[in-house]
Amino acid sequence: MNKEFRFNWDVHGIYGLIIMVAGLGCTLAMLINHSTFSNNRVRYAIWLLLLLLFGIGFLILGGILFGRTVFRNLRHSRLKKNGRAIMADITDFGRDASVSVFGRNPFVAMLHYIDEFGEDHEFVSGVLYRDRSAELTGKQIPVYIMNDNYSKYYVDLNSVLIESDSNQAG
């Protein structure tokens, strides 16, 4: 059960990394070429200022997008390491309308769990880009919760999907 941390890329993380590199390039270009343009100060000062502002802006925007992905992955790994694992049943599959990739909405799994006090808890998985409803409906999936706080959870679909993919390959 103790697997090492695996970074799961998402679109925001990739865009953030690209934008951070562009911002770093703009900022470094301004700092390196700053002394080269000393003869035409007025003309190039505006360009250098714009390059610096775009560079810093891109660095901040890229850092926010990339940081969001990093912190989400760290939160998930912390929940897997320190959280309490419960087994929830997949009851249904739906589409996540808030995400659109090439005009299509990815799938999400809806999970249901009844705790020892008889309270119902509903969980929603991360996105799936293929329809896995036929092979996963009715299965039990580990859901990691933090200190009996059911609002902070991580649905570990990877453990079941890896098993499913290895069974199909063999």
Image (tube, rainbow, N blue to C red):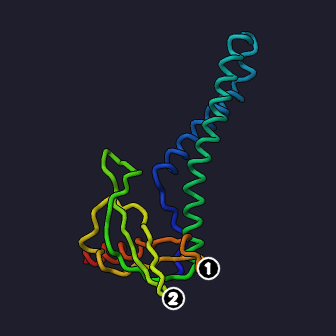
Residue drawn 55% across and 76% down?
145
The residue that appears at 35% across and 48% down in the rendered structure is 101
Q: Amino acid at mark 2?
A: Phe
Q: What is the quadrant of the C terminus in the image?
A: bottom left
What residue is shown at x 58% (from left), y 80% (from top)? 148
Nearer to me, 3 or 122: 122
Label 2: state its secondary structure.
loop
In this rendered view, identify the residue nearer to me: 43 or 118. 118
Crowd band around label 2 with a 10 angstrom C-alpha radius: few (<14), some (14–19), many (20+):
few
Q: What element does badge 1 sit on?
A: loop
134 sits to left or right of 51: left
Residue at the disc numbered 1: 147
Q: Position of residue 81 (x, y in %)?
A: 58, 77
**Circle nearer the N terminus (2, 1):** 2
Answer few, some or many: residues within 10 Å of disc 1's Cα (few below 14, many 20 plus, some between 14 and 19): few
The residue most toward the bottom is: 116
The Cα–Cα distance between marks 2 and 1, rounded to whole angstroms, is 16 Å
At a point 29% along the width and 61% down the height, the residue shown is: 130
User: x, y percentage for residue 152?
Assistant: 56, 70
Q: Amino acid at mark 1?
A: Asn
Q: How many marks?
A: 2
**Which residue is under mark 2?**
117
